């Protein structure tokens, strides 16, 4: 195979962007050969944009049976990701799904089981993993340069959305339409990066408000606290109701701290470990010598195009995936645990009680203002951030 033929399911905001990147040649050795959407206007857009060389389908079964492509990119609403990925893999297609991996981990776990039994390349669009500042922080942690982790704090409040954003679609910010609010729609990348760099917590305690700043039924303000096996703690603060917002990540270890803000990485590096200094220093007041280091983060932040190129290279040449699809369950587990903690007003320990979470979610789906049958596969337009 010299080129990978790609079919896209869902050509709304994200799907059409991916399609344009492929057609523009930004993904070498990839060719757009098919699209699928139940929205006739979007299919007409595809006809006008790409001509008849790109096949158009309004039925997902006909799309999968066509064999008009080698790989599938899924860019539909959240609930549909696991079911469509399972279909794609079982039909023998390499698969790339948009974030999040799904709405609840039970469905994602089923998807991962199918993927593990497949020989196809399965990836997820965690495009923030291509950002050099986060790659460098992961390197500082994994290499031991930062020492043993003690605390992480991520304030990610620059997601401001006015009411008109939510009013643009009846499915937006509803339990039945999206399955969640800021955690599920805006924060999947940050929750993935958090666990990618710092690891998975062992327990979660979250506080959140539902419709605090907007006329919506899902969460738009969250403060969550987590604990890790080694005793380290973490704090995650997010909202769509603050302006101006903040995006600041601070990670402390026993050899210093790192702050990422405004796309810059600053490392306050201790000459000796804090734990070592604590044991050996006898002078009363004092602290380890510290150097403020502006760490260079060279490299291209290739984002969505980088993930697509990596996926195609993995298909053609066996290159290691930046964002394996089976890892999508990790950030979603943290998100689900935060919701369950807020709903039950209690601590949630990991592994998550997936049955309890689904029961609580189903109660909210049944009372949702948006009456969509979430068991049905819909291909309208992909959700946008």
Image (cartoon, rainbow, N blue to C red):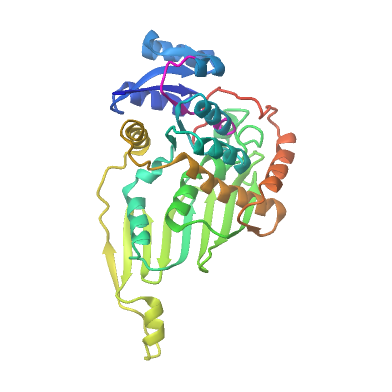
How many discs mark residues in the rendered view? 0
Task: Report the span colored magenta.
Answer: 66-81
**Measured from the top left, where is residue 228 in percent x and y?**
53, 63
The one nearer the camera, 354 or 339, is 354
Locate residue 280, reporting x and y percent: 37, 87
In this view, which residue lies farthest toward the top? Answer: 52
Q: Quadrant of residue 16?
A: top left
Residue 318 sits in which quadrant?
top left
The reply to whether residue 142 is visible in this rendering is yes
Pinpoint residue 66: horizontal percent, then vertical percent.
Answer: 48, 14
363 left or right, relative to 23? right
Q: Residue at x 46, y 13 (%)?
A: 56
Image quadrant in which the N terminus is located: top left
Q: Is residue 261 magenta?
A: no
Q: Is residue 244 in view?
A: no
Picture coordinates of residue 57 (x, y %)?
Answer: 50, 13
Give the residue displayed 44% in from the left and 50% down from the top: 193
Residue 193 drawn above or below residue 325: below
**Left or right of residue 20: residue 93:** right
* Front one among 143 and 320: 320
Instruction: Residue at 66%, 53% (x, y): give it.
Output: 342
Q: Identify whether 270 is placed above or below 110.
A: below
In the displayed structure, 81 sits above or below 137; it is above
Q: Kindly report the secondary structure that dominates the magenta region of the rendered protein.
A: loop
Q: Is residue 74 magenta?
A: yes
């Amino acid at each position: 195979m010299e080129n990978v033929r790609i079919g896209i399911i869902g050509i709304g905001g994200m799907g059409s962007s991916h399609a344009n990147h492929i057609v523009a040649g930004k993904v070498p050795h990839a060719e757009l050969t098919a699209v699928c959407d139940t929205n006739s206007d979007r299919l007409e857009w595809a006809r006008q944009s790409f001509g008849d060389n790109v096949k158009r389908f309004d039925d997902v079964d006909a799309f999968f049976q066509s064999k008009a492509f080698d790989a599938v990119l899924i860019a539909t609403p959240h609930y549909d990701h696991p079911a469509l990925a399972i279909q794609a893999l079982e039909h023998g297609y390499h698969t790339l799904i948009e974030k999040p991996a799904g709405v609840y981990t039970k469905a994602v776990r089923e998807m991962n089981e199918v993927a593990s039994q497949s020989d196809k390349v399965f990836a997820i669009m965690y495009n923030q993993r291509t950002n050099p500042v986060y790659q460098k922080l992961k390197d500082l942690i994994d290499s031991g340069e930062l020492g043993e982790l003690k605390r992480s704090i991520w304030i990610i409040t620059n997601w401001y959305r006015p009411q008109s954003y939510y009013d643009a679609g009846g499915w937006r910010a509803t339990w039945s339409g999206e399955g969640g609010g800021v955690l599920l729609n805006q924060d999947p990348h940050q929750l993935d990066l958090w666990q990618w760099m710092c690891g998975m917590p062992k327990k979660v305690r979250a506080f959140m408000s539902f419709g605090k700043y907007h006329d919506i039924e899902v969460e738009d303000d969250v403060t969550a606290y987590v604990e890790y096996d080694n005793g380290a703690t973490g704090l995650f603060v997010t909202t769509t109701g603050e302006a101006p917002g903040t995006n600041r990540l601070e990670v402390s270890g026993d050899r210093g701290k790192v702050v990422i803000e405004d796309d810059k990485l600053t490392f306050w590096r201790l000459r000796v470990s804090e734990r070592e200094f604590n044991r050996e220093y006898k002078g009363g007041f004092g602290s380890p010598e510290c150097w403020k280091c502006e760490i260079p983060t060279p490299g291209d932040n290739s984002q969505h195009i980088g993930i697509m190129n990596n996926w195609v290279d993995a298909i053609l040449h066996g290159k290691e995936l930046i964002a394996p699809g089976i890892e999508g369950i990790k950030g979603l587990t943290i998100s689900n645990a935060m919701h369950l903690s807020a709903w039950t007003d209690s601590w949630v320990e990991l592994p998550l009680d997936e049955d309890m979470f689904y029961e609580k979610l189903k109660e909210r789906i049944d009372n949702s203002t948006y009456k969509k049958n979430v068991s049905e596969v819909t291909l309208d337009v992909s959700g946008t951030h």
